[in-house]
Image: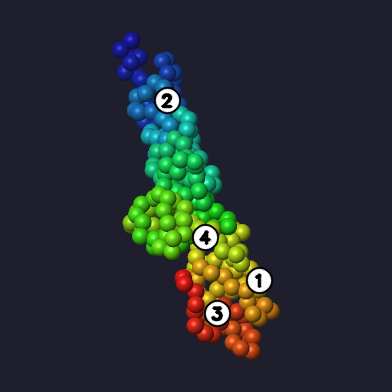
Amino acid sequence: SNASAAGCTTCAAGKASGMGAGACDACEPGKVSDAAASVCTACGTGTYAGSAGSAVCFTCAEGRYSGSTGASACEACAEGHFAPSRGAVTCLKCSNELEEHGFGPAYTSSRGSATCDKCMPKHYMQSDDSGGSGSGDGSGSDGVSLPLRRLSSDGATTVCTECPDGADCSSEGTTLTNMPVEKGQYRFHPTSKVVYPCPYKANCAGGALDYDNATHDEDGAGEVATITGDDDDDA
């Protein structure tokens, strides 16, 4: 009746009430509703509603994804995968046979990443000064074959290269400047690409050395990071 209709209350956004129901019920997580809705609607892929009574679905952030409808949260991309844009329904693999995303086979990522910004173990990252642009196979200025290069947003390129003998690249995320060396080995400076056997092995503890403060003199005193003399490293 009109009297009955006049006694009905319009449900607020985030709630719904079916025909003849006596109350408005909050939408469960993963579902939303507009005002005066009779049912709650599941959020689409790439979006989520994290709490009960939500009026809108939120877009998954970079590095996260939602591949199914009705999600109450977005999942973080696994290690070695990335989601560069908001609203992803799946994560892309950093390294694949086609290299379609511009990352070479040695690139990887941490969990929840929007890009692949680390090198796999046994590799280190350095600026690509080969003169190439973008991504693709090529050779460096010294004629050495390089893996695919990665073009960053500022136009610079980086490349993941195999670590030289004597370097300790057992962990992912190694760069040229932080590259540790094995015990009994040394580098001339943080940009050196060559590792040398240390003539005073007892003083070459390995690891990431302090290049600013450690020197190796003729008496073999101090922990080695550099050796007094001309730097014949071509790095």
Query: At numbered mark 3, what does the secondary structure look like: helix, strand or loop?
Result: loop
Query: Considering only order in the chain, which callout, 1 or 4, is on the residue closer to the N terminus?
Result: 4
Give the residue type at disc 2: Cys
Q: Which residue is mark 3?
A: 226
Image location of residue 160, percent across then percent down:
49, 56
Image location of residue 157, percent across then percent down:
39, 57
Left/right of residue 155 with respect to residue 143 in the rendered view: left
Residue shown at 52%/51% (left/top)?
106
Query: At numbered mark 1, what does the secondary structure look like: helix, strand or loop?
Result: loop
Labels 2, 4: front one: 4
Q: Which residue is mark 4?
A: 124
Residue 217 - label = none
Query: At numbered mark 2, what does the secondary structure look like: helix, strand or loop?
Result: loop
- Front residue of this view, candidates 9 and 232: 232
How far, Cα to Cα, is label 3 from label 2? Answer: 68 Å
State yes or no: discs 3 and 2 in contact (Cβ < 8 Å).
Answer: no
State yes or no: discs 4 and 1 in contact (Cβ < 8 Å).
Answer: no
Query: Considering only order in the chain, which callout, 3 or 1, is on the residue closer to the N terminus?
Result: 1
Residue 40 - label = 2
State yes or no: discs 1 and 3 in contact (Cβ < 8 Å).
Answer: no
Inspect this view and state whether residue 64 appears.
no
- Front residue of this view, candidates 199 and 109: 199
Q: Quadrant of residue 60?
A: top left
Give the residue type at disc 4: Tyr
Q: Is residue 167 above or below residue 91?
A: below
Q: Which residue is mark 1?
A: 183
Residue at far top of view? 1
Image location of residue 107, percent across then percent down:
50, 51
